[in-house]
Image (spheres, grey):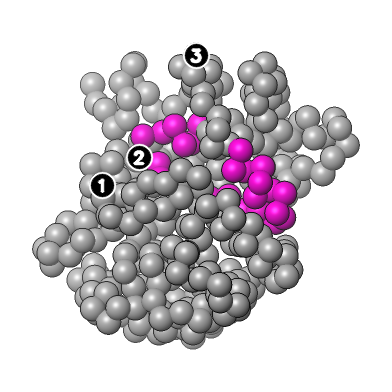
Amino acid sequence: MEYTRLGRSGLSVSRLVLGTMNFGPETSETDSHAVMDSAHEHGINFFDTADVYGARPAGGVTEQIIGRWFERGGGRRDKTVLATKVYLPTGEWPNNGGLSARHIMGACESSLRRLQTDHIDLYQMHHIDRNTPWEEIWEAFTVLRQQGKVLYFGSSNFAGWHIAQAQEAARTRHFLGLVSEQSIYNLMNRWIELEVLPAARDYGIGVIAWSPLNAGVLGGVLRKQLDGRSARGSSGRSVATVAEHRETIAAYEKLCALIGVDPAHVGLAWLLAQDGVTGPIIGPRTIEQVESSVRALDVRLDAGTLAELDELFPPPGLNGAKPAPEAYAW
């Protein structure tokens, strides 16, 4: 396993992040525990969850599954860099969501109880809260930090401007601020390259990529369909994506076959090669999927392959040859 620092912090995390959103709804508790054990066996120490995962609107199921896994001992908690999230509604009453001080403090206590731990390593804002001032948010986070209940803070689904606002507000409090931003990022969805990724690099914030294979579309969906195998990209909203971009996806899979690398591994390896990316989130439902994802760490894409991928999936908003954020300038 390869490790890196999370943003400008001193925290060491694996280049692959174990996503747990399937734990409960798609993967049984027994299988979820086996997946987490396998992740540790392969050196994955960075686990990502959220207080709403498992069931809506109350959530909490996935955190409880992780908590019972920690309870089994064997150094499971000590070996894990644990990340969870706050913001989305966990009930129907007015203060059951958002980033008010009241909700942050209550949600943190609930997550700690479900996770059966005394601290959260990385507490992430699941979304920007446009109704709560940064002074209130950072004050609540400062208290959690002083109490030893949270060590680091991150954001998710923020725009570049939101990151700037958050960091400048933290600076006035002489607070470390954000160390990570979790955003959708893959070959087919590169919008964060315009503002989010440049802002994160400038502020020393590590980027965690969710949906690295665009809901399975970049995982060899066409080949699996031809082989008669079940493919995640063949259901839900992915069906429309495949229909709209079939020619490009076919060319992508042809390129992967030419270089002899599984499409899913190419998609992950491309993200691992991007400057500022801490690592992609993998969401395995089985031990076999954990083992497959780990093999992506051995893939090194040469300059020619990276250029071909850029031709198939062009960066957004380019102004001539200028990279973002200068793509906006003239």
Residue 302 showing in the rendered view:
yes
Lower position in the chain sequence, tag 2 or tag 1 = 1
Q: Secondary structure at mark 1?
A: loop
Give coordinates of residue 261: x percent, y percent: 65, 26
Give coordinates of residue 217: x percent, y percent: 67, 38
Residue drawn at point x = 12 percent, y = 64 percent: 174
Residue drawn at point x = 23 percent, y = 74 percent: 142
Lower position in the chain sequence, tag 3 or tag 2 = 2
- What residue is shown with label 1? 204
Residue drawn at point x = 28 percent, y = 41 percent: 201
Question: Farthest residue toward the top?
Answer: 304
Is residue 223 rendered to the left or right of residue 155? right
Pointer 3 and pointer 2: residues touching (CB < 8 Å)?
A: no
Camera-side residue of 159 and 80 = 80
Between the residue at mark 2 and the residue at mark 1, the CA separation in whole angstroms equals 8 Å
Q: Quadrant of residue 320?
A: top left
- What residue is shown with label 3? 304
Lower position in the chain sequence, tag 1 or tag 3 = 1
* Part of the protein shown in magenta: 270-295
For the C terminus, give its image quadrant.
top left
The crowding category of the residue bearing disc 3, from other C-alpha atoms within 10 Å (few below 14, some 14 to 19, many at least 20), is few
- What residue is shown with label 2? 276
**Where 217 sits versus 312, above or below?**
below
Q: Amino acid at mark 1?
A: Gly
Give coordinates of residue 313: x percent, y percent: 53, 25
Q: Secondary structure at mark 3?
A: helix
Between the residue at mark 3 and the residue at mark 2, the CA separation in whole angstroms equals 21 Å
